[in-house]
Amino acid sequence: MTEYPYQETDQQLANRMFGAGTALATHYGTARARRIAAERPECEAINTADRGDLIHEVVRYAAHIWQCEPGLVYSQERTAAVVRVRNTVYLVAHHELGMGWSDIGRALKRNHTSTLRGERNARDAVTRDPLFAARVNAVKGFVRKLTDTE
């Protein structure tokens, strides 16, 4: 086994991935940062500011897929159609962009617990509803194209 003279700590990796001193670096100063880096190395190239901008692109695309007005996603509207779009954005932002619950909530003017519950509801809906799953996969594909760093 090769020994390395310097091994990066979880917090150092999080600082490198998300920018030192950012909320994401503080939140992800754990093994989660290593998991994100291992699963999606291109996430390292996306800094925190870009993630905040990307979530608004995700909102626009998800609203288009669900045939909903993007502005309603940020509103207090609680109709089923708007909630589906919101939950899709929560799921994709967390799993594809690696954003934390508070950061997602801040971007969409929601409490972090609302984003957590919405993402959980979206995961459940994906397993039950093939149409919902197809739409979520379309949004995930859009985000992967946006985050390609080739």
Image (tube, rainbow, N blue to C red):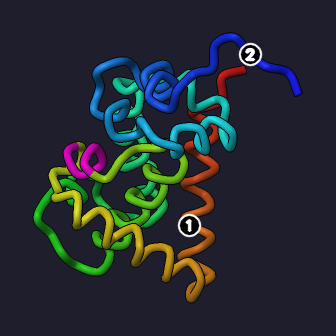
Give the extent of the magenta segment. 102-106
The tag on residue 135 is 1
Spot occupied by residue 25 in the image (x, y as percentages of width and height): 37, 30
Q: Residue at x 22, y 58 (%)?
A: 112
Residue sitting nearer the eye, 32 or 47: 32
How dense is the environment of label 1, judged by Cα within 10 Å: few (below 14), some, or many (20 and up)? some
Q: Nearer the viewer, residue 108 or 47?
A: 47
Name the amino acid, label 2: Tyr
Give the residue at x 74% y 16%: 4
Residue drawn at (28%, 33%), measured in percent from left and top?
23
In magenta segment, residue 105: yes
Residue on which disc 2 sits: 4
Looking at numbered disc 1 in the image, what kind of residue is underneath it?
A: Arg
Work out whether mark 2 precedes mark 1 in sequence or the reverse, and give the earlier one. Answer: 2
Closer to viewer: mark 2 or mark 1: 2
Which quadrant of the structure image shows residue 79?
bottom left
- What secondary structure prevails in the magenta region? helix
Q: Residue furthest right?
A: 1
Side (left or right) of 59 relative to 136: left
Above or below residue 50? Residue 62 is below
Image quadrant of residue 74?
A: bottom left
What is the x, y in percent for residue 46? 50, 25
- Label tally: 2
Counting from the top left corner in percent of width and height, residue 129 is at 56, 85
